[in-house]
Amino acid sequence: GAGVSQSPSNKVTEKGKDVELRCDPISGHTALYWYRQSLGQGLEFLIYFQGNSAPDKSGLPSDRFSAERTGGSVSTLTIQRTQQEDSAVYLCASSLVWGTDTQYFGPGTRLTVL
Amino acid sequence: AQTVTQSQPEMSVQEAETVTLSCTYDTSESNYYLFWYKQPPSRQMILVIRQEAYKQQNATENRFSVNFQKAAKSFSLKISDSQLGDTAMYFCAFMTSQGGSEKLVFGKGTKLTVNP
């Protein structure tokens, strides 16, 4: 079946603009995760959803970052007033159930803030 | 907080040979899960192998196997009969089963190059 998909694949934006990154999890997967991969910080957890609720938002770096999930499926990560340090690859993953189930990753969105 | 350390930033191996990637972790938990993910240049993170800490038997998946030493908090990945397609970044990751936050904690990665 189809894997996790993310769009856009690449996004270039100017400092101060808002961006939205989209994630489509594997059909039927109830848990969804966002991670950020950057040269300096490696792979870091941002937020996860169980259904439409986000029990753990501890990794969001600032209040410029927010995420939502609707219908227990698609999720959107929004970054407001982007800064150059937001440049990174944003990875989404999903798992069948919440808990210690294996997470399957999408191809990521490479965000470049000029 | 849990930490994962991969001490080999880069490694190379000849095609058909065997290579071992190292990973150590730090946790006070007794039950947890360990993973190796592969990330080729396409950026897609691909699960290579998974190990449950409560299982003493080392996990294997075809040419990939792990050496899980719970007391030493070590979780190395052995790739046998290396193939050109194994060239990628390899990330070791840890997940706790407690606390209600099933996030993955990753190491910094090892860049593996398989040479023809």
Image: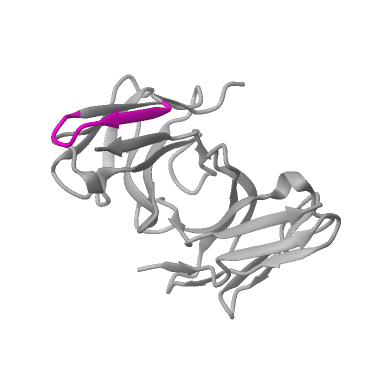
**Picture residue at 47% right of the left edge, 61% below the top:** B108
**Picture residue at 42% right of the left edge, 68% below the top:** B3
Question: Residue A84 appears at what percent x and percent y?
Answer: 23, 45
Left or right: B46 as drawn, with respect to B64:
left
Left or right: A104 as drawn, with respect to A62:
right
Left or right: B36 as drawn, with respect to A20:
right
The foreground one among A11 and B33 is A11
The foreground one among B47 and A12 is A12
Magenta residues, as a range? A9-18
Q: Quadrant of the N terminus of chain B?
A: bottom left
Question: Residue A74 appears at what percent x and percent y?
Answer: 36, 22
- In this rendering, the answer to whether A63 lies above or below B49 is above
Q: Residue at the far front: name it.
A: A114
Question: Residue B34 appears at what percent x and percent y?
Answer: 56, 59
The answer to whether residue B109 is seen in the rendering is yes
Question: Residue B76 appears at what percent x and percent y?
Answer: 65, 67
- In this rendering, the answer to whether B75 lies above or below A9 is below
The image quarter containing residue B40 is: top right
The answer to whether residue B60 is seen in the rendering is no
Task: Please identify the dominant SS of the magenta region.
Answer: loop
The foreground one among A71 and A66 is A66
The image quarter containing residue A8 is: top left
Q: Residue at the far bottom: name it.
A: B72
